[in-house]
Image (cartoon, rainbow, N blue to C red):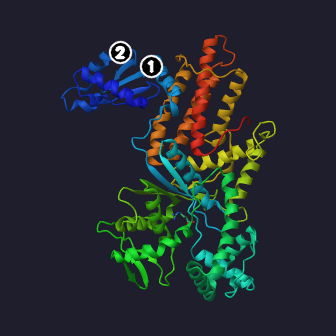
Amino acid sequence: MKKLLDVLSEKMGQVFEQAGFDRAGGKVSLSNRADLCEYQCNGALSLAKQCHKNPMEIAEAVGKLLVGDVFTDVSIAKPGFLNFNLSPEFLKGFVQEMADSEKFGLPAPEKEKMIIVDYGGPNVAKPLHVGHLRAAVIGESIKRILRYAGHRVVGDIHMGDWGLQMGLIISELKERNPALPYFDDSFLGEYPEEAPFTISELEEIYPAASAKSKEDAAFKEKAMEATKKLQDGVRGYRALWQKIIDISVADLKKNYDKLKVDFDLWNGESTVHNEIAGMVQYLKDGGYAYMSDGALVVDVAREDDKKPIPPCMVLKSDGAALYNTTDLATLLVRKREYHPDLIVYVVDKRQELYFEQVFRCAKKTGLTEEKTELKFIGFGTMNGPDGKPFKTREGGVMRLERLIAEIEAQVKSEGREPDDVLSGDAPGSSATEKIALAALKYGDLSNQATKDYCFDMKKFTSFEGDTGPYLLYTIVRIKSILRKYGKDAPTALRTPEAAGEKALFRALTGFLPAMEYAERELAPHRLCAYAYELANAFNSFYHETRILSEEDSTKRDGYIALASLCKEVLEQVIDLLGFEAPEQM
Ligand code: ARG
């Protein structure tokens, strides 16, 4: 379906033409004086110069021809605005068509694109902390939006599992337990089934090793050697590394499950290791890469650069692969396996320059196809109430698990304790958990991704205002009405009469433009704003309308159909944001 404003603009354009003016003048927009009218057209003003006429004259000529089956209550305001409302019958027809269409009339894309969303990006052996929360939450929503819009989308977690961090862990393990068979070069037998550490030990080892490497140059040297040995394929190092991956991935999966974030590909930096030698050769043969201070680099600066863009490093001076190397090789593999039209990277905005270098390098050297658009969606920091990056009360790095547990506790403590047993929601996704997830995700997604935002527990979990729980509350309210209604909800809408009812119809028409914008700009926050607007429109309607107690049964059925459609749209939108509503709350 076309968006309502486009349909109206087309009709208005025809009238402009009929009156002897350019149809381009017919552009209709939402009224910016909602107290005066629902829609407006400023075409008379923009055409005035071109046709040497007074805008008032043009507006009046057009206004006279506007007929009541679409445009009603037409009035002309100085210096030439056409103000009007929509015929309720016409509005009903439009919303009914939405209700009867698949995806509420969202048109299929002109061309189905192959899209990879690279998001999450956790580092193995490090606890998942809030720094990675935004990547997961925003990336998941972008993936769902693109998929719903009709594209073929693959989500890839792109774990950090290959660089110096692995060498650090391995070296620390070696210092603590040198007798492990992994460090014995002469050991040829099978390595033990069981990993020589638990996830909590692993999570303690990494920060310890990382701190040590900053003070102890010899240790850092060893870690770099270990990294090289791992990347060169030393058997014991590879086996130990695999244990680290297995233990970490199991833990990551648990965490992402809880966040309702799921990946199609669990690839990592290591996945492309075998591509690196060939890629490096290709870059050298093509004359792209050259040695600079011992490292292998590709120039990516351009003449018109406003700020200096340093060369993209492909190999470090010790020959080890680095973050860039694996990202470039990943692009090569993605080209070969998917021929993507678009790759979206959802990563901390502080990595913007890095990605600029990688993208330029890949484009320049043909590691990625001409047609492949590479897009960086950089997100800001989640801050605490003090305006500094979010920490635990004790000042440490906040683990995601703990944050979620704290939000759940807050939801329960609000004196609104949702009765998880009665609510009919399965354990593992109880009402409390659903509310907490909505609070967390909506709190994040309702901000433009690039902006930093402040995590405000009280505000995010509130059932009132621009929050996730408020949306759930609205959906649950409709669910309850539908339950009491007792039969399947009818689908035939009725022509709106009251102001609140009509406003709800108009709010429903906002779905298509919101989706279009969210897809084009990869902007979940636009859907948040839309969901909030729709929920508000429903609640106003609810407060001014006796729905279930309406005696006229056709009227009542019409109300129910409207409420039910509203619920479907809201549920669809929150699904695109990555959370869902409980049965009761
Ligand atoms: N692991 C990285 C980090 O923690 C994020 C990975 C982002 N994705 C990518 N293709 N580089 O900073």
Quadrant where the N terminus is found in the figure: top left
Q: Secondary structure at mark 2?
A: loop
Please name which of the two marks, 1 or 2, marks the residue nearer to the observer.
1
Question: Looking at the rendered structure, which numbered label has been put on residue 67?
Answer: 2
**Is disc 2's CB within 8 Å of ligand 1?**
no
Q: Quadrant of residue 18?
A: top left
Quadrant containing ligand 1 reads: bottom right
* Secondary structure state at the residue bearing disc 1: helix
In this orientation, does residue 126 appear? Answer: no
Observer-nearest of 532 and 318:
318
Of residues 108 and 527, which is closer to you in this image? 108
Dot 1 or dot 2, earlier in sequence: 2
Give the amino acid at mark 2.
Answer: Val
- For image coordinates 52% across by 22% down, the residue present is 502
- Using a 10 Å C-alpha cutoff, classify the residue at mark 1 as few (fewer than 14 neighbours), some (14 to 19) or many (20 or more): some
Q: Which residue is mark 1?
A: 90
Observer able to see residue 407: yes
The residue lying furthest to the left in this view is: 52
**Residue that extends furthest to the right in the rendered view of this protein:** 421
Q: Could you say which is closer to the camera, residue 342 or residue 385? A: 342
Which residue is rendered at x = 39% and y = 41% of the image? 110
x, y (%) of residue 453?
57, 54
Residue lying at 59% horizontally and 86% vertically, measured from the top left: 221
Q: Is residue 101 left or right of residue 394?
A: left
Location of residue 147 in the rendering, given as x and y in whole percent from the top left corner:
51, 45
Which mark, by number, is residue 480?
none
Q: Residue 495: x and y, percent?
A: 52, 16
Kind of residue at badge 1 = Phe
Q: CA distance from mark 1 to mark 2?
A: 12 Å
Foreground of the two, 391 or 556: 556
Q: Position of residue 431 (x, y in %)?
A: 74, 41
Q: Quadrant of residue 384?
A: bottom right
